[in-house]
Amino acid sequence: MAELVLNDVVIRWVSVSSMNNNVYLVTERASGQQLLVDAADDIQAIEGLLSDASADGPNPELVGIATTHQHWDHVRALAELSSRYPVPTYAGADDVAGIEQECGIKTSHPLRHGEQIELGDVIIEAIHLRGHTPGSIAYVLRDSSGQVVVLSGDSLFPGGVGNTGNDPQRFMSLFADVTERVFERFDDATLVLPGHGDSTTLGDERPYLAEWQARGW
């Protein structure tokens, strides 16, 4: 497990399954309200994450479950977690049907680009990044310390954008959205927490945008 402690939030995460999916838990420190991002797999590991966050705020309480996109490896524990914690669920509007097909959960709060989730006094913005899936969402929060954090799902990783199935149209859609909606909006110190593997920053990745565009993946 790993953690990031900021002024307003604590973000904890754990890697689960053979695909090394990252499950993230964001706790707003003032209220203890919590948002879990990507109930990918391993309900015991997720419960462990919640237990580890028991001191991250007063009276910690899971108040929402967000999904970055519809792929099966990101929703394998969603049905069981939703059964244990009947809280609002969030996902990109264009992936809602796919999520329901994968795990039987009907998303209670479909999100469009720019819509927000309130976690205590912290605002988490939904950034629609089209291409990996039709409704892929990155969740962005701005801490009062000045740190911006992007939970990017499978749309942005160290070394490139997410898989677009060797489809040039999907790649250009995702590349354009990542460029315009992430790199052009946020500074180099912005932390990227992806759906698999290690974190990165926009500053580390920005010099390679032209290379990504040229190679087409």
Image: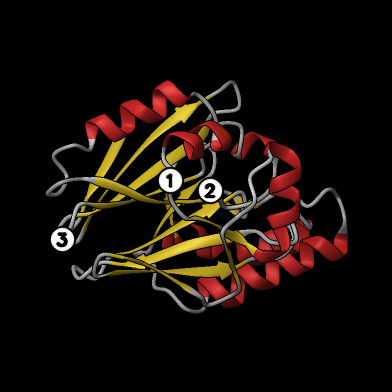
Residue holding disc 2? 158
C-alpha separation, residue under disc 3 versus residue under disc 1: 20 Å
Residue type, numbered disc 3: Asn
- The colour style of the image is secondary structure
State the CA–CA distance, disc 3 to disc 2: 25 Å
Near mark 3 (Cα within 10 A), the count class, few <14, some 14-19 or many ≥20, is: few
Classify the position of the N terminus by image quarter: top left
Which residue bears the numbered disc 1?
A: 199
In percent of width and height, residue 151 lies at 46, 55
- First in sequence: mark 3 vs mark 2: 3
Q: Residue at x 56, y 75 (%)?
A: 181
Q: Position of residue 183 (x, y in %)?
A: 52, 71
Q: Is residue 44 above or below residue 130?
A: above
Name the residue rendered at 69%, 56% in the picture.
96
Is 38 placed above or below 186 here? Answer: above
Whether 205 is drawn above or below 118: the answer is above
Question: Which label's residue is closer to the chain start, 3 or 1?
Answer: 3
Tell which tag, 3 or 2, sits nearer the viewer.
Answer: 3
